[in-house]
Image (spheres, rainbow, N blue to C red):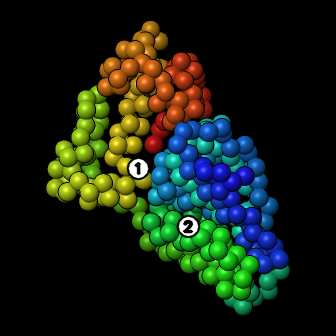
Amino acid sequence: MNNHARKIISFSRNYYSEIMQLGRYNYNKAEKSLEEHIHPNQIEICYYDKGSQWFCVGDERYLVKGGEVFIHFPGEVHGSGGFPEGKGLLYWFIIDLSELSSQSNQLVGNDIVFLCNELIRRRERHFTGTREMKQILEEIFCVYRKSAYSKLGIISIRTLTKRFLLLLLDCIDKKHSVIDERLTQVFQYIDKHISTPITISVLADLCCLSESRFKNLFKEQTGFTPGDYIQRKRIQRAIQLLKQNPDITVSNVAYQFNFSSPQYLSSVVKKYTGFSPSILKGQKGTLEHIMDF
């Protein structure tokens, strides 16, 4: 299915023997959950550009944030564990590894399959990526649209795929996971003032940066814009307060966290979670952590 929010390339096996599918969704509100499924002999690599998303693999649950990579290894049962597909931008890339079992010497076999096998061998499923990953995936979409089945187009897409896989391996080896110390006081400030208006200029001053440089640093380190992060924090606190105080009204919570009206709070909560505040208030179990990030 291709529309303004969701685009999928299903590669022809006649031209791309191992590259199966490249997809992208860009949701401005939460959508239905991803049902459990499995990819036999295939690896699925997800790059989350912005937002946050729960993934479940077997009995394990993972929260993936903007700027992070998440890998589903071959034969694993996976889905979103009942959580909706969240507001945000996600890419997924599926590569078939059937050739892997038939290669007697991997070094002289298919380079793409070999690189995927290196990912499997390292067994790192969740790690921080780089901005270049999005650029490469968007370039594949562009090349496919213009010249998917020309000799030059096929070579370009295969080369971009190898660049993407090499970049994944480089990120695993370098472990890009350290949060800039300048943001520590920003997080503390947001937590302390979450019920009052928070301006970008104040946050930028805490880091001794211009507003534009601060926004870039914040997005690079957290996967969220400052405004989106603050909004998610307010929703998280509002849901927690509703759950902890059965007698409190949505109106009281809305005004406590600086929402203009209870109707606006309800619309924002549903946009981010797919559920109304009243449903989340009485929900226990899986959805209890729906706004964790």
Residue 81 in the image, given as x and y percentages of width and height = 65, 40
- Mark 2 packing: few (<14 Cα in 10 Å), some, or many (20+)? some
Residue 148 in view: yes
Location of residue 235 (image quadrant) = top left
How many marks are shown on the rendered structure?
Answer: 2
Q: Is residue 30 above or below residue 97?
A: above
**Residue 97 shown left or right of residue 145 in the figure:** right
**Residue 65 shown left or right of residue 192 in the figure:** right
- Give the mark toward the camera: 2 or 1: 2
Residue 246 in the image, given as x and y percentages of width and height = 47, 12
**Residue 190 shown left or right of residue 28 in the figure:** left
Q: Is residue 67 above or below residue 136?
A: above
Residue 289 in view: no
Name the residue carrying label 1.
224
Task: Kindly identify the residue that appears in the image at 66 percent across and 63 percent down.
Answer: 22
Residue 145 in the image, given as x and y percentages of width and height = 65, 70
Amino acid found under the numbered disc labelled 2? Glu
Name the residue carrying label 2.
138
Q: Under tag 1, what secondary structure?
A: loop
Report the front residue among 272 and 222. 272
Furthest-bottom residue in this view: 108
